[in-house]
Every structure is written in C-alpha cells, then in structure tokens.
Image (cartoon, rainbow, N blue to C red):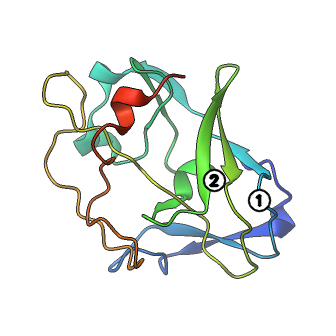
Amino acid sequence: MFLIPQSAYRIVSGGGKMRNDKGRSVFARQDIPAGTVVGDYLGIVMHHDEENEMRDGLYSMTCTPGYDVLPRPEDEGMHLLNHSCANNCDAFPYQGHMIVCAQRHIFAGEEMTISYALWCNETTQHPVSCVEHQCECGSRFCIGTMHAEPGIWESWDP
C-alpha cells in the first residue's frame, strides 16, 4: 500500500532498472525527501516454508526470521519496487508492519527501488534456493546478484 499521495508516483509497465524488464516499475513524479514513509508492504503473512518462488514469483518479503509477507501481484503496492544494488528505498519492521521509507532524497523522474536482499543459507529450509538470482541493475555499485551480501541476515534483528 502506498502511503504517499498518488500524485507523488506513477506506475509504468516495463522500463525499470532491470534489463529485459517486463514487469511494472514505480517512478517518483515529484521529489521525495529522505526519511519519507513511502508505504506499507501488505499481503498474506505466511511461514517461509509455505512460500513457492515458482508459483509466487519474487514478491514475498521476509518480515521476521520465520515469516514472510506475500502480496497480491495484481494490486498496486510496495511489491512493485524493483531491485537495485543502489536502492533509494528500504524496508524496516515496525509494530508488525514492514514500512518502506526513502533512504535518501529521490528526485522527480527517478525510479523508486529497493534491495531484494534475498536469503541464501543452505542450512535453513528457506524457500528461496541459493541458485543465483542475477542482478542487472546497471548501477556502478552492482554486486551482480539480488542476494544479500554475506552476514546481512545473520546480523538482522527485527
């Protein structure tokens, strides 16, 4: 769910950061100051063992070490933010919600992005396999994968 006015963003089919992107992308229509609450990542709360990437795509977001939020892909919401290694938005757990905020100033016309930071730990039963999810965001900071850098998940404490 977007928590900024509809006049502050636009949703475009294709045209996002990822080359060969066939999905939707979100662009700022006006400048969005750093720290602005952009939206709430809404959907069905499910145990991560119930997630199925082949069925659900890459729309789910981990909200606790054991549970994910799976939105309805056809809805308009935070799940439409594409991945970038130089993301300008980030998600934070807050009172049972995953709140998405602008982590820096976002300029009018700029795509609004988030780092997917996919989990990759073969010792867990997490549904996202450790098969490479290649990143082609084009950022000069691109690490070449949509997976979190080593140590990120281990240090995460909601």
The residue shown at (35%, 70%) is 142
Q: Position of residue 130 (x, y in %)?
A: 15, 42
Q: Which mark is residue 76?
A: 2
Numbered disc total: 2
Residue under label 1: 34
Answer with the quarter of the image where residue 47 lies.
Answer: top left
**Label at residue 98:** none
Q: Is residue 75 visible?
A: no
Q: Secondary structure at mark 1?
A: loop
User: Residue 124: x and y, percent?
Assistant: 19, 22
52 lies above or below 49? below
Give the position of the N terminus as an image quadrant: top right
Q: CA distance from mark 1 to mark 2?
A: 22 Å
In this rendering, the answer to whether 126 lies above or below 91 is: above
Location of the C terminus by quadrant is top right
Task: Indicate left or right for 68 with 56 as reference.
Answer: right
Residue 150: percent from the left, percent from the top? 27, 43
Tag 1: amino acid: Ala
**Around disc 1, counting alpha carbons within 10 Å, would you say few (fewer than 14), some (14 to 19), or many (20 or more)?**
some
Quadrant of the rendered structure where residue 10 is? bottom right
> Which mark is nearer the camera, 1 or 2?
1
Image coords of residue 122 (percent x, y): 13, 30
